[in-house]
């Protein structure tokens, strides 16, 4: 009980609480360029084809790893530290762009709205790069689990604010008031970067004094762009790590895509689905993220990754139960609770694991890349869910989703066993090699 209590107390650490606030700032802009913006366009009478095309403004979230090396390496516009300087600069621009977007009229400035929505998405994705790097670098290894739970909790609360909250404000005071309010809430993240600590880890390229400007620029580009990838490729079993990360959330994603069609086919009304998914699901997600962080702190990242992943797979069995029980509101509440609770636990464990993989010299780039790879299963592979559900039927399909993650869990278990068998000598050698690789960039510490 003492160990569990200490794990829970880690959420009261000042740095973890700051991560909670930054998670809120990270999640706030997402729906302002997605469902909330779609509601605004629909209420203004914009054509459905145009509304659908606006989904493209979310592209920067998937491509943020392309410009993350610049955030990792270039000096920030404000000289208050590498992470804080970029964080404050991006958030000031994001607040201004959000207000400008809210001031547009979709009936007469649709192209301007599209450009500003794309700008908000780009700045939001860039903000995510800085926030993730700051979180990974500011928290010691034993706090990465609670940090993962905190950032997911803040993110979910923000989505409720920018989704339901923004719609309520727009209904009563207009769309500009809704977007201006969301912009004001973004100040919370700005204050964290203004008054919070700067991570001590530094990764500044130091070109030789004898090098020409061209040679210095070439070396900088090679380190900034190629360095994160070559550094990660030096890690033992890195191809297996990528495969396991891609497959870890595959089963949950396949089930999630077909969850609402299942509910509708069983006769649930949209009101019933919304009440369970948005209310019950919201609180289950928050609790699950916090529990996932505690489990990671209590059992370690790798063991929590396997345990929470197994629970996530088992959670999909409640869809099978729902399919067999039919239209039963109590089973719907149970199904939504189980899916969101276990999915959030696994999500927190995965965030902690991805954070542990990042080298201090390339934190922003490597985390952006790894998180993008983790989303592949949720986007590309999960798109086959409809075809499989049509061919197999509801119960067999959801049974399939419970085992879809087994290969990834088996890989993680095998890698954990191999690392444990390798002993401290191999881990120290890997750590020494990583330190040597970062020596030329001025890195002050390394993380296995």
Image (cartoon, rainbow, N blue to C red):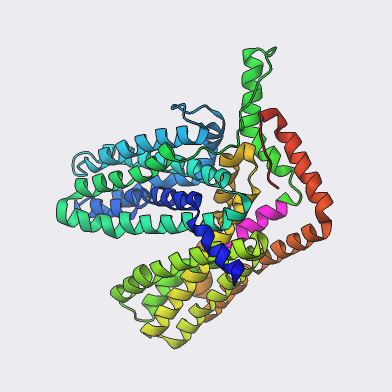
- On the picture, is 277 further left or further right than 306? left
Q: Is residue 249 magenta?
A: yes
Query: Where residue 321 sits in the image (x, y, percent)?
Result: 49, 84
Q: Residue at x 53, y 46 (%)?
A: 135
Quarter of image, res 42: bottom left
> 16 and 180: which one is in front?
16
- On the picture, is 103 further left or further right than 139? left
Q: Is residue 401 magenta?
A: no
Quarter of image, res 234: top right
Q: Residue at x 66, y 53 (%)?
A: 242
> 18 and 97: which one is in front?
18
Q: Which segment did they paint magenta?
A: 239-250
Residue situated furthest bottom in the rendering? 325
Judge whether 171 appears above or below 309 on screen.
above
Q: How many marks?
A: 0
Determine if residue 386 is in view. Answer: no
Judge whether 374 appears above or below 184 on screen.
below
Quarter of image, res 196: top left
**SS assignment for the magenta stretch, majority:** helix
Q: Residue at x 51, y 27 (%)?
A: 75
Query: Where residue 416 sits in the image (x, y, percent)?
Result: 74, 61
Determine if residue 163 is in view. Answer: yes
Q: Residue at x 78, y 40 (%)?
A: 433
- On the picture, is 25 further left or further right than 378? left
Task: Look at the image and tell me in which quarter the N terminus lies.
Answer: bottom right
> 123 and 266: which one is in front?
123
Query: Where residue 247 sits in the image (x, y, percent)?
Result: 62, 61
Judge whether 416 appears above or below 179 on screen.
below
Query: Where residue 372 sits in the image (x, y, percent)?
Result: 55, 49
């Amino acid at each position: 009980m003492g160990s569990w209590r200490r794990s829970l107390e880690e959420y009261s650490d000042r740095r973890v609480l700051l991560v909670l606030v930054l998670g809120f700032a990270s999640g706030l802009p997402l729906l302002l360029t997605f469902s909330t913006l779609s509601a605004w366009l629909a209420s203004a009478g914009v054509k459905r084809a145009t509304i659908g095309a606006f989904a493209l403004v979310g592209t920067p979230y998937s491509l943020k790893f392309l410009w993350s090396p610049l955030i990792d390496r270039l000096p920030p516009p404000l000289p208050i530290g590498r992470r804080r300087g970029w964080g404050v600069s991006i958030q000031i621009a994001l607040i201004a762009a959000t207000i400008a977007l809210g001031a547009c009229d979709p009936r007469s400035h649709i192209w301007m709205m599209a450009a500003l929505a794309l700008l908000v998405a780009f700045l939001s994705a860039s903000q995510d790069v800085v926030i993730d790097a700051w979180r990974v670098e500011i928290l010691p290894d034993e706090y990465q689990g609670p940090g993962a739970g905190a950032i997911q909790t803040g993110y979910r609360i923000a989505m409720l604010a920018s989704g339901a909250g923004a719609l309520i404000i727009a209904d009563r005071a207009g769309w500009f008031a809704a977007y201006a309010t969301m912009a004001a809430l973004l100040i919370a993240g700005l204050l964290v970067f203004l008054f919070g600590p700067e991570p001590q880890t530094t990764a500044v390229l130091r070109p030789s004094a004898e090098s020409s400007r061209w040679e210095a620029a070439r070396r900088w580009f090679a380190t900034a762009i190629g360095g994160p990838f070559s550094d990660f490729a030096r890690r033992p079993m890195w191809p297996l790590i990528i495969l396991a990360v891609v497959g870890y959330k595959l089963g949950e994603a396949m089930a999630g895509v077909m969850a609402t069609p299942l509910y509708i086919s069983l006769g649930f009304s949209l009101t019933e689905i919304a009440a369970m998914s948005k209310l019950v699901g919201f609180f289950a997600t928050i609790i699950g993220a916090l529990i996932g962080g505690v489990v990671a702190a209590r059992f370690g990242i790798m063991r929590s990754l396997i345990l929470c992943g197994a629970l996530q797979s088992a959670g999909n069995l409640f869809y099978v139960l729902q399919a067999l029980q039919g239209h039963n509101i109590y089973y719907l509440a149970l199904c939504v609770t189980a899916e969101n609770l276990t999915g959030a636990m696994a999500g927190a464990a995965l965030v902690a694991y991805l954070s542990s993989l990042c080298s201090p010299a390339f934190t922003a780039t490597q985390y952006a890349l790894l998180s993008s790879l983790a989303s592949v299963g949720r986007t590309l592979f999960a798109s086959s869910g409809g075809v499989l559900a049509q061919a197999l039927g509801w119960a067999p399909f959801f049974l399939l989703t419970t085992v879809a993650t087994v290969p990834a869990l088996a890989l993680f278990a095998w890698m954990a066993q191999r690392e444990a068998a390798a002993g401290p000598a191999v881990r120290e050698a890997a750590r020494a090699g990583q330190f040597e690789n970062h020596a030329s960039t001025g890195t002050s510490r390394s993380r296995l």
